[in-house]
Amino acid sequence: MVVGEGDGMVVDSNLQIGVNGDAFAALTASMYRKARRAAAAAGFGETGFFELDAEGGRMCAAGRNDLVIVVIAEPRVNVGLLRVEMLKALEAFA
Amino acid sequence: MSDDIRTLSETLAADPSSIVFVQLGEALRRSGQIELAWRVATRGLDRHAQRADAHDLVARIAIDRGDFPRARAEWETVLTLAPGHGGAQKGLGFLCFQQGDLDEAARYLGAALADDPQDESLAAALDTVRASHPDRRPIEEAPTLRVPVVDARTLFQEVLGDPSQTAILLDGDGYVVAGQYLTADGRDLGADIGAQLSGVSEEANRAMRHLSLGRWRQIVFEAESASVAMAPSGGGVLLVAAPRSVPLGYVRRLLERSLERVRRWTGARA
């Protein structure tokens, strides 16, 4: 999904049937925004890649220019590869 | 060559000053490639002579090579750099036992067991040492009964090794329970940084309530100057931060080791 970081609205998505895209978009964008602001406030600078590992799956996000790419995946996904692809895709937002 | 070893080798080749040599050396040692492990570990130690975990690795490989004097010297260095290091105490305990110095073996193993009371192999080893003693007298037992006094601020020192890596344990209200974040001029910014970053875990808790993903286990994110990893711990959260030059996978390992350290610490205090 591509999501607006500020409003959590879906800009574009490709989801499996049954996934509540709106809820994932809003909540992931909110978490990403929080992480970005917290990291900046802590003096760590701008945030790039973000990953949450939960019992039932992984949520990954990477943002630029107020847009966030959000990926929802199975727990067993190769997150290293996912990260590289997401950062590559992020170049399109430059 | 396993995937792990290949990945770690590539990481080290790309950045020879990386601390990933510790993981690579250990992976090689476990896979039986002792001489290769030795070369990786000793070259790494040349660059990172102040790292206790590097000396510990060299000591363990020295044991595999049958070089006991070198192993002893390395573990003694570890105890100088990181007093109370469990691995070094355990190693020296076994070494002393093998060389017939039962009193010293019991002293080291007792101290290691006091540091990690859940380690059954240590308890068994200590029993063996006691049983082997000619007069079967109780030897240096006091350390096993004493809970070590640990300064909460330096709780993660031994796990992290490198001072540029930080771990902070926060309670549910965002207060620092253990750990510190020291700036170059020696100021502790742990409370400030913890307060800022604990908000991320609160946001994650909120998200998990609405999504059907179960409980969150770990959050990792990369910022310009640091990689941050966090996980729930007790009613609060444990944060680990490391410079961006540290591989993300290693930061996750540091988080896991720090969580284990918290578990031992809280278990010992209970």
Image: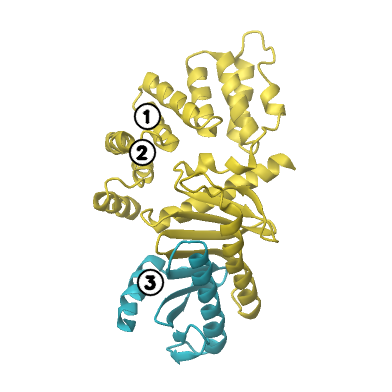
Chain colours: A cyan, B yellow
Label 3: few (<14), some (14–19) or many (≥20) C-alpha neighbours in 10 Å = some
Image quadrant in which the C terminus of chain B is located? top right
Front-most of residues B213 and B73: B73
- Pinpoint residue B114: horizontal percent, then vertical percent: 65, 31
- Above or below for B60 versus B201: above
Say whether mark 2 and mark 3 are on the same chain.
no
The image quarter containing residue B52 is top left
Q: Which residue is denoted by mark 3 in the rendering?
A: A82
Identify which residue is drawn at 45% across, 62% down. Answer: A44
Label 1 near label 2: C-beta < 8 Å? yes
Question: Which of pointers 2 and 1 lies earlier in the amino acid sequence?
Answer: 2
Q: Which residue is denoted by mark 2 in the rendering?
A: B29
Identify which amino acid the numbered label 1 is placed on.
Asp
Q: Chain of mark 1?
A: B
Front-most of residues B177 and B90: B177
Label 2 near label 3: C-beta < 8 Å? no
Furthest residue in direction front, as rendered = B185
- Pinpoint residue B12: horizontal percent, then vertical percent: 28, 49
Say whether mark 1 and mark 2 are on the same chain.
yes
- Pinpoint residue B6: horizontal percent, then vertical percent: 29, 53
Mark 3: secondary structure: helix
Labelled disc at residue B64: 1
Distance, label 1 to label 3, CA atoms, is: 38 Å
Front-most of residues B182 and B120: B182
